[in-house]
Amino acid sequence: MNSVEFVPLKKAAEDPTSRIARPVERQDRSPTGAAFAINGRFYGQPVTGVQRYAREIVSEMDSLLGEGAGRGTLVLPPGAEGPGLAAIAPLATGGASGHAWEQTILPFRAKPPLLNLCNTGPVAVRRQIVCMHDTNVFDEPDSYSLAFRLVYRLLLPGLARRAAVITSVSQTSAQRLSHHLGIPAGTITVVPNGHEHTSRWNGAASDLGQRLRDIRPFLLLLGSQAKHKNAAFILKQAPALDAMGLDLVVAGGSAQIFAQMQAVEATNIHRLGYVSDDDLAWLYAHALCLAFPSLSEGFGIPIVEAMALGCPVVSSDRSCMPEICGDAALLADPEESEAWLACFRRLAASPSLQDDLRGRGRERVGHFSWRASARTYLDLLNRL
């Protein structure tokens, strides 16, 4: 049976985001007086959703601490260059790189408590916080290379047993972590992604208006090759979309950690490859909708980016997506193509529905703030 759902408005008490930790910001004192260290390995990695999370959290932590008020240290591996921060001092290190650096060099150069924002950390350190974004390596193993699966399946259980605090980015992800790693769900602090970074993007600086000047109304699909992203599901709908007068723009590149996805071609598919943040701002502003058919996510940051920039969202009804979308998106079964085509048809035919989703989306993103999440991490560090 086809399934299309427009999620009804939830009462606050029923909203999963109402259980997310949101400390009240206090301007009359420094958020923490304790020294701490941050695992800066992500500054040497390409920026995907996980690295975006870490960068934005660190930037907001620095802002909250205030110039000269903090005692934080950002420990960087060889070749990584940190940003210019006011209250968090960089510490460049040598030696190995990658996981080897994280397990052998970082524990000796970082004075606990240690904050790890990108899934892993040194198993030898107990007084640390580890943010585990998702359990896709367990739930969707075919999306990843064998080497990646082996490393994560070795590290995550050890960190779950030894780390002082485990955080995650959604209630759904916390529940899955509890299931796979034996962590009591109530002990995992949910510290979600934010949306404010989109205010720094400038769609007017993009040249996509010229490059796509002859395009018809289009759906935006972010083109990760990870199988759990389910991009091929939308790509295979290209002929039906063509008959509806719609094009499909695929933005984004690939990553070596992911298994290869079979390519799908059609005349109304426009592949852009890597795009800048300004390009993304233009795409979100001009797309009929973001198509987000993922089977499994820890958070799904493109959803809140789209909502923040006024782009309607059609999302999978699996995993954390209903939690993140609330009543601000059309949800459909990611294995029922007719359900998705029905959503696209409704949107294309109804400017009022488009406007309604834009308004609901802009209201929804107020639940997700980098600044509030940074405050949570500073409070957690202060307690260790």
Image (cartoon, rainbow, N blue to C red):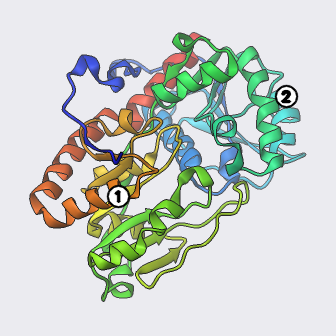
Whether residue 183 is visible to the viewer of this picture, yes or no, is yes
What residue is drawn where x is 47% and y is 70%?
250
Q: Quadrant of the C terminus?
A: top right
* Lower sequence index among marks 1 and 2: 2
Of the residues shown, which amino acid type is indicated by label 2?
Answer: Phe
Quick one: 33 or 239, which is closer to the camera? 239
Q: Percent x, y for residue 364?
A: 26, 39
Image check: 218 left or right of 275?
left
Residue 295 image point, x, y percent: 51, 45
**Dot 1 surroundings within 10 Å: few (below 14), some, or many (20 or more)?**
some
With respect to residue 207, does 59 lie above or below?
Answer: above
Q: Nearer the viewer, residue 245 or 259?
A: 245
Task: Identify which residue, 247 or 335, lies in the foreground.
Answer: 335
Q: Secondary structure at mark 1?
A: helix
Quarter-wise, where is residue 136 in the image?
top right
Q: Quadrant of residue 50?
A: top right
| Residue under the image location 37 percent in, 49 percent down | 315
Is residue 276 visible in the rendered image? The answer is: no
Q: Is residue 83 left or right of residue 197?
A: right
- Mark on residue 108? 2
- Rendering quarter of residue 349: bottom left
* Residue position marked by numbered label 1 in the rendering: 338
Residue type pointed to by label 1: Glu
The reply, left or right, for residue 72 in relation to residue 64 is right
* Residue drawn at 21 percent across, 61 percent down: 347
Rendered location of residue 369, percent (x, y): 36, 36
Q: SS at mark 2? A: helix
Q: Choose between 222 and 231: the one closer to the eye.
A: 231
Q: Quadrant of the N terminus?
A: top left
Q: Return the residue found at the far left.
A: 352
Does residue 226 lie above or below 188 as drawn?
A: below
